[in-house]
Image (spheres, rainbow, N blue to C red):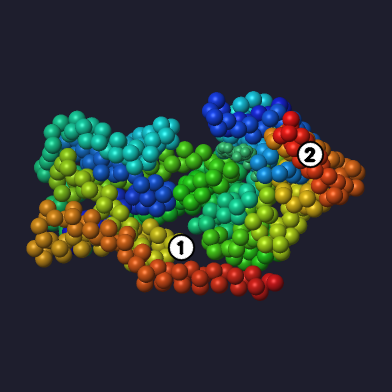
Amino acid sequence: MLSALDLGLIYGLMALGVYLTFRVLDFPDLTVDGSFTTGAAVTASLIIAGQSPWLATAAGAVAGAIAGLVTGMLHTKGKINPLLAGILTQIALYSINLRIMGRANLPLLRTDTLLSGLRDDRHLGTWVSVAVFAVVVLVFMLALDWFLNTDLGLALQATGDNERMIRAQGVSTDNTKILGLAVSNGLVGLAGGLIAQYQGFADIGMGIGLIVAGLASVIIGQAVIPGRRFIFATLAVVVGSVVYRIVIQLALQAGADPNDMKLISAILVIAALLLPRLGVFRHMRARRRERLIEAAAKGEAARA
Amino acid sequence: MLEVRNLRKIFFQHTPNEKVALDGVDLTLAEGDFVTVIGSNGAGKSTLLNVVAGEFRPEGGTVHIDGADVTKLPVHKVARWVGRVFQDPMAGTTPHGTIEQNLAMAFARGRTRGLRTGVTRAKREIFREELKALELDLENRLRTDVGLLSGGQRQALSLLMATFSQPKILLLDEHTAALDPARAALVTRLTDEAVARHGLTTLMVTHNMHQALAMGNRLIMMHEGRIIYELAGEQKQRATTDDLLHEFEKLKAVSDRTLLA
Ligand SMILES: Nc1ncnc2c1ncn2[C@@H]1O[C@H](COP(=O)(O)OP(=O)(O)O)[C@@H](O)[C@H]1O
Ligand SMILES: [Mg+2]
């Protein structure tokens, strides 16, 4: 069970990336499935080639970021629809990833990785590894929160919120989109490299359907922690990722076929997308908004 | 400060739907000029402002701001010189950002945006002072989401965001038209105050002839992509809405005659 926490935390990095594109930038980026594997492929190949695991992991993140940059260029400079731009990069990456790895699967079991220490001491899947990964994810989460509150980060948020306004304030939304996609896929590539080291191999198919897992994490997280203030939005994403992995783990333990997991994930996301549109929930949200507006109007009324 | 020379904007050029929106517009604003723009629907008023702001590239003519040729620059580059308020109160702010975040984004207009904190304590003090002048009690709600404000409050905030960073040119496109009369009066007053305080060179489109006469030191009337009537100084002060209506009537007579011809 604790290994589900491990995975949830590492995949949390990927979910943070998905949050940045889907939620903050309002850009449905499908590069993720490819860039995750790219991160894993680059990291694994460099480790096998004898490079330091630190350098290899960083290179995996950079490779992911470059993939995001390509999608960003296709969309902004090439004026290609966001979904198509992401799919094009993703498909192209499949071939590129195979080139990087040289074959469909790269085992890492007898090589030194970032996680060798934990593995040798039998700490993987224990509270020790959970604590380590929690700290790692927390650092990246806080860094992302910090970034989103810089001048540049605010411009990036506004790009997803009101593009015309932020352009009128002097921001090239082409640049903020490219930057956001690069950072997002950098996080995804980092997660890919870490997962490869965690499970002890990189595989050409390891990224398939990940976008759904990322989305599920974002949606579940926002259901569990609805606030957006301070660090709650990003914290929700990480918690969502952990909850998602626990649900998957429970389903497997209950005897679900691992091959059905993608179907279950997709149904989970569909449910999460459709449920809020049901009458009851819509009513609840409308009420909440009304209350907020009332509270906001009170300030005005007090003045008048 | 603003020099518009022989500006032409043609939509759907070389198609059956071709539409000449600007048909050779010449306009010069000296520093501190406040020009109000009136004209019937489709006269080209918004198009003029949009071309100046870099939203559209003109088919002919030039736009210079403060000596710089901005004719071919995209919106985000022209923004270095230009502050804008749109007709739609939702257009000038980001709904999911807080009041202070929105102000911080406007505060950074014309500067390179880097990894410095957007809302610092020092900036927050500036924002609080600026918001006080609006007398909307917004200075005590810096962390409220802008999406929760009323249209009037959002427009007042948009106006502040467009003016407090002291742009070379302020462009206002019917920015009080979507508001109820009380809110429109408030935003009109705030506009006058902001323009006076910063001495802003301003181009303001309005559908309200009283407003066009009461505000600013010059007035232009547009029709079918041209400036067809101008008032300035004392002449403008003496003019009445009847005078303006008279000008509109003359246009109508002309177009009736061409129809008959
Ligand atoms: N983006 C656009 N695409 C095509 N035609 C446009 C566009 N914007 C304005 N026009 C046309 O140009 C003419 C002038 O429009 P506009 O400048 O909006 O008028 P005004 O603001 O004076 O009412 C109108 O005929 C309008 O239909
Ligand atoms: Mg208009």
Q: Is residue A242 above or below residue B38?
A: below
At 18% from the left and 45% from the top, the residue drawn is A206
Position of B105 with respect to B251 (left or right) is left
| Position of residue A149 measured from the top left corner of the image (x, y, whole percent) | 49, 52
Q: Which residue is mark 2?
A: B253
All told, the count of numbered labels is 2
Marks 2 & 1 on one chain: no
The residue mark sitting in front, 2 or 1, is 2
At 32% from the left and 36% from the top, the residue drawn is A67
Position of B90 with respect to A101 (left or right) is right
Q: Secondary structure at mark 2?
A: helix
Give the amino acid at mark 2: Ala
Q: Front-most of B227 and A62?
A: B227
Chain for disc number 1: A
Q: Which residue is mark 1?
A: A229
Residue B153, quarter of picture: bottom right
Distance between mark 2 and mark 1 Cα atoms: 60 Å
| Position of residue B244 measured from the top left corner of the image (x, y, whole percent) | 82, 46
At 34% from the left and 37% from the top, the residue drawn is A85
Give the amino acid at mark 1: Arg
Residue A143 visible at all: no
Q: Front-most of B59 and A161?
A: B59
Chain for disc number 2: B
Mark 1, other Cα within 10 Å: few <14 / some 14–19 / many ≥20: few
Mark 2, other Cα within 10 Å: few <14 / some 14–19 / many ≥20: few
Q: Front-most of B62 and A37?
A: B62
Position of A82 with respect to B238 (left or right) is left
Residue A188 visible at all: yes
Q: Is residue A165 above or below residue A301?
A: above
Residue B233, quarter of picture: top right
Q: Secondary structure at mark 1?
A: loop
- Location of the N terminus of chain B (image quadrant): top right
